[in-house]
Amino acid sequence: MALRTIDLIALGSPTSDPYDPSATAWALARAYATRGDDVRVIRPEGPSQAPQPEGVASVEITVPLRRPGAAVDQAAFASEAGRHVRPTADVIVRDPSGLGAIRARGRSGGHPPLVAFVRLIELHAFDRERGRLTPRRWTDRLDTWRDRRDVRRFEKAALTEADVLFVDAPGLAPAIATEYAVPAERVRTALPPVPDLPPPASRDAARAMLDIPRDVPVAVSPVPENGKDTGGVDRARETFRRIRPLFPGARLIIVGASPPTEPGLVAIPRRDAEAFGLGFAAANVALFAKNRGTFDPMVIGAMRAGCAVAAVPSLHLPVDPGDALKYAPTDDPGDLASILAELFADPALAREIAAHGVEHSALYHPDRIVRAIDEATSKLAP
C-alpha cells in the first residue's frame, strides 16, 4: 500500500501505562508508523510519560481552560485540533470520539474521511457519575442540567461529524442509534488495539529478576488503577490465601500497586509496560478477580505472554474468548480459588488454555485495527 498521511487526534500524551485512556490512540499511531505511513498525533499540551513512538510526529495544542474537565473545554480542544489537521491528510482518526466537532480546514464532501472510535457514551458516563451525587441546592440541579445539555450537544456534534464510527462493545451501536440517531451503516465493530508488552528474555529470567524459584506455581494479578482498585486487589489476595495451604511455595504477583506485605506475595508497584510484561512473563496463571466495568487490555497482554487466564464471570471481552479463558462460576473468591487451584494442579490444562489465549490475542493487534480502518475508508473514496 502506498504511503499515506494520517492525522490522529488523541486526548493525552505518550504513555507507558497500558491502562491509560490514551494508550489505544498511541497504539494506532505506532501501527501506522511501523508500516511506513506519515502519521502525526494532535494532542493536548502536557508532559509525556513515555518516549514518543519512532516515526510518529506530534503537535501539542494549548487551550485555555475555563472549567477543567468540563464539556466546553473538551469541545474547544476538538475545534483547535481541527485547525491543525494537515490539508494533505488522507485520513483523520479520533480516538476516542470525544466531545465537539473538529471541523478540519479544507474538509468537504467527506474527504478526507473522518474515523472516530467510540469507547463509551459520554452522556451515559455523565449520568452515572452525577447519579451518585445528591444536589443540595436548586443551583446544583441547574448546573447539572446545563452540564448534561453541553455533554449531549457536544457528543452529538462529534458523532454525527464522523464518516465512520468504530465501537468495541456490543451495546454501544444500539445506544448510539437510540441516543443520537446515527445511521446504522456508519457504525462498525473493531476490537480495541492492544500493543505488545516488552517481555524479559524468558520465564526463568523474569523469575530471577523477582527472586522467585523456577519450580513453583505463580499467579499474577494486574491492577487497572493504583489506589482505586482496592476491591480487585483484596479479592485477588483472598483468592490466593485460600489455595496457598495446598501450594506452600506458590507466589502471587501484584503489578501496578503496593499491597500490604504477606507470605507469598510479590509486588511490582510500577505502572509501565515493562512492569506488566515482567509480571506476566514470570507467571503461569493470570488472575482477574474483578470486572473493571470496561474492556481490560491486560487480559490480552496476559494471553500473549503465555499465561492461562482465570477470571470472574462478570469480566467480558468484546469477542467470546471460548477456550482461551477459564471463568469461575461466580465472583466469589472461593470459586475463583477453585479455578486457580485447578490450573496450578494441572499444568497441562494451563498450557492448553494459554495456547488458545495466544491465538485469541492476535485479534487485538493494532495492525489489524488499522487494516479495518483502511477497509472502511476505502469504501468512502470518491
Image (cartoon, rainbow, N blue to C red):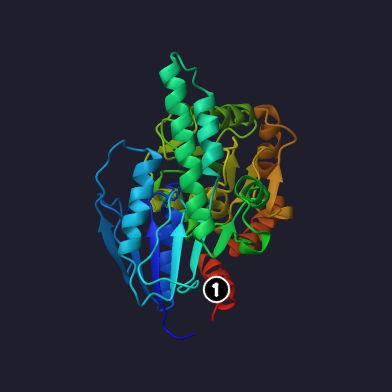
Is 301 in front, or is 51? 51
Residue 289 pos. (x, y %): 60, 35
Res. 260 visible in picture: no
Residue 18 vs 136, above or below: the answer is: below
Residue 45 pos. (x, y %): 26, 52
Residue 329 lies left or right of residue 237; in this view the side is right
Reading the image, the residue beneath label 1 is 377
Disc 1 secondary structure class? helix
Res. 37 visible in picture: yes
Residue type (three-letter) at the residue carrying disc 1: Thr
Residue 375 vs 19, above or below: the answer is: below
Residue 80 pos. (x, y %): 31, 56
Occupied quadrant, residue 373 = bottom right
Residue 102 vs 5, above or below: the answer is: above
Q: Residue furthest bottom?
A: 2
Residue 325 pos. (x, y %): 68, 49
Residue 157 lies left or right of residue 63; in this view the side is right
Is 183 in front, or is 221? 183
Occupied quadrant, residue 248 = top right
Is 83 in front, or is 234? 83
Q: How many marks?
A: 1
Circle 1 residues within 10 Å: few <14, some 14–19, many ≥20: some
* Quadrant in which the C terminus appears: bottom right
User: Which residue lies at the image location 29% right of the left edge and 64% below the top edge?
Assistant: 58
Is 244 in front, or is 253? 253
User: Which residue lies at the image location 56% right of the left edge and 78% below the top edge?
Assistant: 378
User: Which residue lies at the image location 54% right of the left edge and 32% below the top edge?
Assistant: 127
